[in-house]
Amino acid sequence: MTPLPLRVATLAGDGIGPEVTHAAVAVLRTVCDRYDVPLELEALPYGATWYLATGEGFPSGEPKRLARSFDAILAGALGDPRVRDHAHVRLIRHALLTELDLYANLRPAEQLLPALSPLARVQAGQARVQLMVISENLEGFHPDRDRRVRVTDDEDAHVTEEWHTPHLVARLLRFAFAWAQSRGRRRVTLVDKTNLVPAHRLWRHAFQTVASDYPDIAHDVRLVDTVAHDLVRAPERLDVLVTTNLFGEILSDLTAGLVGGLGIAPSANLHPGRCSLFEPVHGSAPDLVGTGRANPLAAIRTVSLLLDTCGHREAAAMVDAAVMASLQAHVTTPDLGGRATTGAVTEYVVRHVRTRPLVRDGE
Ligand code: ATP
């Protein structure tokens, strides 16, 4: 039986976005070809250049069309020095997250090679890092919830609000426990700052309620500062971290750093059963544009996350194996200590996916 087509819209975006998305699409095409998954691709033109030409993020109605027509959106990066305050990022990325209701942000940090970690304990085999940061994507701190409050005759204070709504918090916590259960993970840790932010008590309350529905999964509650400390001292004691958008952004850069850096860190913005947005954790890295030094592995590993989420686990495993092979062969860009270009790493991964025996579930 021919599998259903996998329908993917690509949003290459700005900076190194087009370069790494080109790499990701090459791998996606190759792996879908090998596993006989019909692939339907459409390249979306949105990004800084589109915004500067039209004054809008995308045409009205576009999120609804994307939700109807695609299983996933594969994004590169958004961010461009020509656009003040990255206004277009809000109009494109934030608007897509909101309109598609992509409430769960997932950032895995898996130790691929011990040598890629800056931690001596990991390199010595005394600690193994396998972390997932799941954060709320639609509320918490958001730049458009910023206002000025007059505090003296000549001074305004800036107030950025943090919002937490009980049913949205509970929805994310349920997602985190269900995800942990489906992946055989052992512990879910709530990361908050209840001692400074009273609104975080709401998270603790909901966490205890949701956790009681998952008696097989250990759970605990930790302050973000102690988690930051322990991620460096004893990362092997942590597993799935669930938290607010701000803490998720900060901690996931730290967890990416623990296993090899932004050059290999993928992410997903999910709403189970709906068209979701997949993107590398890194931004547009203007310093690397056109140099051949952009590491494509974050975008390629994002393809693996997309395939896995869309039910193509064997194809995802094949991409993971190819990434691992490139690391083991030291075919890496300079951020990982290698001398290969973006194109050379991509070619290596594509060749591996094209030529290796097929991985089948259960093998
Ligand atoms: P933006 O404003 O779009 O977030 P940025 O440059 O401030 O862009 P990132 O793109 O996340 O933030 O990158 C920070 C630095 O990390 C970059 O300047 C770059 O040197 C490095 N970096 C990011 N992505 C990669 C990558 N794919 N390969 C190699 N180095 C990277």
Image: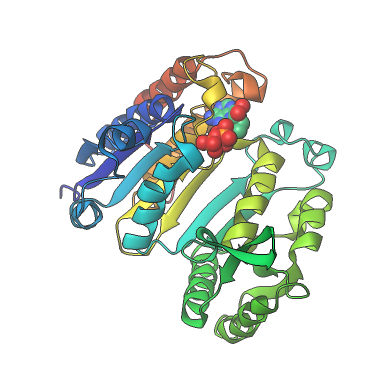
Residue sitting nearer the eye, 84 or 213: 84
Q: Residue furthest left?
A: 1
x, y percent for residue 33: 25, 33
Instruction: In the rendered view, tell whether residue 71 sits above or below residue 140.
Output: above
Question: Can the viewer see residue 336?
Answer: yes
Question: Can the viewer see residue 263?
Answer: no
Tell how many labels: 0
Instruction: In the rendered view, tell whether residue 207 sits above or below residue 128.
Output: below
Instruction: In the rendered view, tell whether residue 188 sits above or below residue 301.
Output: below
Instruction: Please give left or right for residue 208 compared with residue 7 in the image.
Output: right
x, y percent for residue 254: 69, 46
Q: Where's ligand 1: which quadrant?
A: top right
Question: What residue is rendered at 66% in x and 70% in y?
Answer: 190
**Image coloring type:** rainbow
x, y percent for residue 233: 84, 51
x, y percent for residue 315: 37, 42
Instruction: In the rendered view, tell whether residue 358 sits above or below residue 22.
Output: below
Instruction: Please give left or right for residue 278 compared with residue 159 in the image.
Output: left
Question: What residue is rendered at 60% in x and 52% in y?
Answer: 249
Q: Quadrant of residue 332?
A: top right
Residue sitting nearer the eye, 55 or 283: 55
